[in-house]
Structure formats: structure tokens, C-alpha cells
Amino acid sequence: MGISRRPLDAGWGSVFITSFLVLSLILVAFLARLAYGAARSHRRVAEGVLTDYASLAAHELVRRAANEIGYNGCYPIVSALRRAAAAPGGGLPEPAALGAADDEGLRRALALAPSLFILDPAGRALDPARGSLVSSGAPLDAAAADWIRASLPAVAAAKPDLARSFTAASAKIGGRTRAFVVASAGPVLVGFEMDRAVLRAWIDRAVKRGPLLPASLGDGHLTNDLLDVGVIDPEGSDLFRSGEGRGGDLRARVPFGDAYGGVLDGAVAVVSIDPAAAPRLVIGGLPESHVPLLLALQGVAAGLVVAAIVLLRRERALAAARSEFIARVSHELRTPLTQIRMFAETLLLDRARTEAERRRSLEIIDQEARRLGDLVENVLRFSRGERGDIHLAPRPRAVAPLVREIVASFLPLARGRGVRVETRLDAAAVASLDDDAMRQVLLNLLDNAVKYGPAGQCVVVGAERGGAGVRVWVEDEGPGVPEAERSRIWNRFERLPRDRDRAVAGTGIGLTVVRDLAALQGGRAWVEEASGGGARFVVELPA
């Protein structure tokens, strides 16, 4: 007793492959997420390092700018004002007179102070004409004088060490930000208003003194050109700005605080690093975002999975079509074989009672043998076409005699089904064609016309010159082909839905063979509506 083995069901195989592809897509998505997370983490670390370097540069800017302005600017002026306030009479000389002594540093510092002042915080009059506030140099407008009287005593009270140091305060007065330096000189306060343009120039000089980053970074090749440097005053306005805005988010903010006596107290140093400098500061540089690439790869993977699923569905449909084709071919072969066997047995067993019956039996055997031969030839042509193994030898040929010959060979089959065949042939039509291929084309079209048309119909075969060549056509009186279906019927294994439900035999490859053979001869094939309402199949060949 043999053991039969059933092959793996095609449906389960497709489910397995589809599941495997979907799992592959999920794995690709997981790996993409891991890669994205690693790249993002690497970038965060690199950005953190660059931000730390920006903070280092900002601290250096605070140190330099505060030292430049405080030591070389504010300190000499405040010291001179203290001396003037302590002198007999306590007068306040003009800035030019204050720096008239042989002190180059003081004269350079006075460029920062266009207006000098002495204020008695108790409100006592220092001058009969000017009251508790005495100024020299550029006149203080009334709004600035009122602000000095109202605000600077409180600023001084909050800084108990102003007897040895000084501090700065700023305010928006008259629509613009103004900065003042104040120090204690015994019972009075001395100070000056800072010129913002000169202050900006001094900060610029501090920046240009050298790289804000240590020379050990970047092998000494890093310059301030790779930095965006700014100083923001306490009112939020730009006091100083250099750079081209290339730093992006790699930014650090460091307040000046009480650096060098609080000369820029309330101001903030802002430094950002150009990402182009990242390769010199961080090993591997600043990683680029791989999100577009990862999304593209994910898209490709998803596309491949979808394509594979579509191909699997097509393969299943093709497998089903092949199974149906084999069943149809088997049925098509069985019918003529049954007829041949039945009438052959009739003759062998001498059951035919008359000579007419014997002749009729022989005619049926001949018809069915022809039909069987045409069917086998069709299948062989289709098989060779699938393998690309059809070789034709087209040559110039008068079309009318060949068509008559083919129609004559088909007449027994047509008569057996009660169909009349007429020809309308142009005797002068000459085309480049292969005899055997043309025979197969015309027999397929005639067989279709007989099968799908009504009993007793008249099938017309024509040949005429037209268009770019010679047209051979077969016209029936059947239901025709709907316009929406006219392109589909040429596909392999394709049959019209109405024909599947009818008892009309067919393999679904006849028109495919017609189309392929027409193309191999340099022509084309199509279907259109016949003059009587049926279908007209046309094959055009080169003239």
C-alpha cells in the first residue's frame, strides 16, 4: 500500500510568506528605530560638548569685557571723581579738565564717560543752582537727572562696598537704554553715564584680543570667526553683536553679575558655535540627521513587502487560472476524443446500418480529429510563446488564396455546427506573413466565431488593404464584446464573465495566441463592433 503525500497548501504557503515579510518589515522598523535612537543620542552628546565649549567662550568674554571696561575704563574715571569730590570745595571739573593731568590711561578712559556727576543721596544741595545733583560734560537731560536722583541711591544702598568699588545700573529712559556707573565717595555718590557706542567698541576690542576658546582646542586653529558673540543689556537690547548667525541652537548664556565690581551687572554674554567647527572640537563631528534616509529605507522595505504581497496574490491568481486552464483543456480534449472513440467503435463493430451512416461517422471522426489537432496546436503555440520559443519566417504572400485554403479546411467543422462561412477577399492584397502562423490565427478566430455565435449564423471572413497594411477580419453574429472588456480578452486565461456561466467550452488562450502571432509577424490585433451587431476581430499585417 503506497503512502500519499499532500503538498503544502498554496494558501498556507502564501500566509507563511506574507507573515515572514511582515515580520521582516517590523524588524527593519525596529532596527531603524535603534539606529535613529543611537544617532540622536550621539548628536545630543556632541551638541552638549559644543554647548559646554560655547559656555567656556562666554565666560572668557565676561572676564575680558569686564576687565577691559572695568579696569581700563571705569576704575580710572571713578578714582579721579573720588579725588575731585574729596578736594577742597568738592567741585566737579569738566571731563577734559579731569583728564588734563599726564595720565594717558585716564584720557583714554574718559572717552567712555561723556557725562560726569556727583549726587548727594540725602538730597542736600551741592550747588545753589543745581541742587543735589551736579554734572559736567554733556548735559544730562531732565529725565536722566530725575532717574539718577530717584534710583541710584537705592542701587548704592544695595552695594555696601561701593566705597572701594563701583557698580553699574541701566534703564530705558526716553525710549532708549542708558547705562550709568556709580561709586561712593564719602557722603556723596559719584558716577558717569557710559557712551553705548564707545562701550560697544571696548567690548569688540576685548573680543579681538584673541580666541575666546583655549588654544588647546582644535590644535590652535580655532578663531572667533567660528563664534557668534553677543552682549545683551539688562533691558534686553543688543549692546554688542558679532558673527553671522551661524551658531543655531549651540548657544550658551553667561550673566556678567558682579564681575569686576559689577561694571556690566545685569548684562548677559551670549556665545554660539558654528556647527562647521564641530569636526575640530568633537571626534566625529556633529552627526547629521539620518531620518530622511531611515524613512526612505523604511519606505523601500514597505514597498518591497507590498510588492511581494501583490506578486503572491498574482501568483495565486495565476495558479488558479492555470488549474482552470488545465481543467478546460482536459475537457476540450475529452470531447473530441469521446466522439472519435464512439464513432470509431461504431465502424469497428459494424453498427452503421447504411452507407450514409458510415460516411457520416467518418466525417465526424475527421471533424473531431481536425478539432483535436487545432486544439493541440493552439496549446503548443501558447506553450512556445510562454517560453519565447516561437520562430516565424514572414514572406510576401497573396492573402486571398491562403484565406480560402484555411476557410476550406474549417468548413467541415462549421457545417457540423450549422454555421455558414462567407468570404470577402481583395485579390490584390499582399502581406508579409508566415503561412502556419496565419493559419493558426484564422482558425482560432473562426473557432471563436462559431462557438460564441448563435446556431445558423453566417460568419464572414474578409481581407482588404487598409491603414498601414493588409487587414484580415472575421465577423460573427454573436453578442459582441463590451467596449470595457475589449482590452482584457487578449490576456491569457481570460474569459468574459458571461461566457464562464454558459456551457461554452474554451481554454482562454486562443486570443492570446492570435495577439502574439500577429505581433511576431509585425502586425497587431483588435476587436470592434460588427456591422450586424456582433464582434469583428481584425488582424493587421504589414503590406
Image: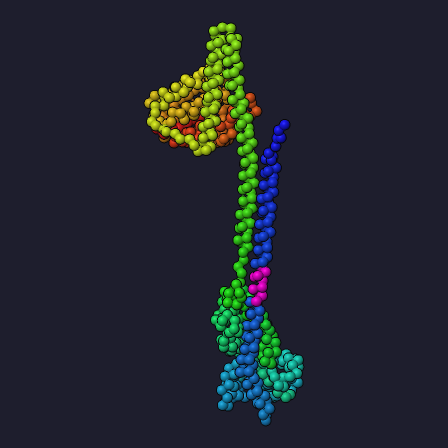
Q: Quadrant of the N terminus?
A: top right
Q: Nearer the viewer, residue 51 or 388?
A: 388
Q: Report x, y in % for residue 121.
A: 65, 84
For image coordinates 52% across by 16% down, the residue present is 341
Q: Quadrant of residue 324?
A: top right
For image coordinates 56% across by 61% down, the residue present is 43
Q: Quadrant of residue 268?
A: bottom right
What is the chief secondary structure element of the magenta stretch?
A: helix
Q: Is 38 above or below relative to 429?
A: below
Total marks in image? 0
Residue positioned most to the bottom: 88
Q: Quadrant of residue 144?
A: bottom right
Q: Quadrant of the C terminus?
A: top left
The region drawn magenta spans 40-49
**Residue 170 seen in this snapshot:** no
Q: Nearer the viewer, residue 92 or 250?
A: 250
Q: Report x, y in % for residue 375.
A: 48, 23
Q: Nearer the viewer, residue 434 or 89?
A: 434
Q: Residue 86 in magenta?
A: no
**Residue 462 seen in this snapshot:** yes
Q: Residue 47 in magenta?
A: yes
**Colour scheme used in the picture?**
rainbow
For image coordinates 58% across by 83% down, the residue present is 191
Left or right, residue 411 beside residue 61: left
Q: Is 317 above or below relative to 147?
A: above
For image coordinates 59% across by 34% down, the residue present is 7
Q: Nearer the viewer, residue 278 or 470?
A: 278
Q: Report x, y in % for residue 246.
A: 51, 65
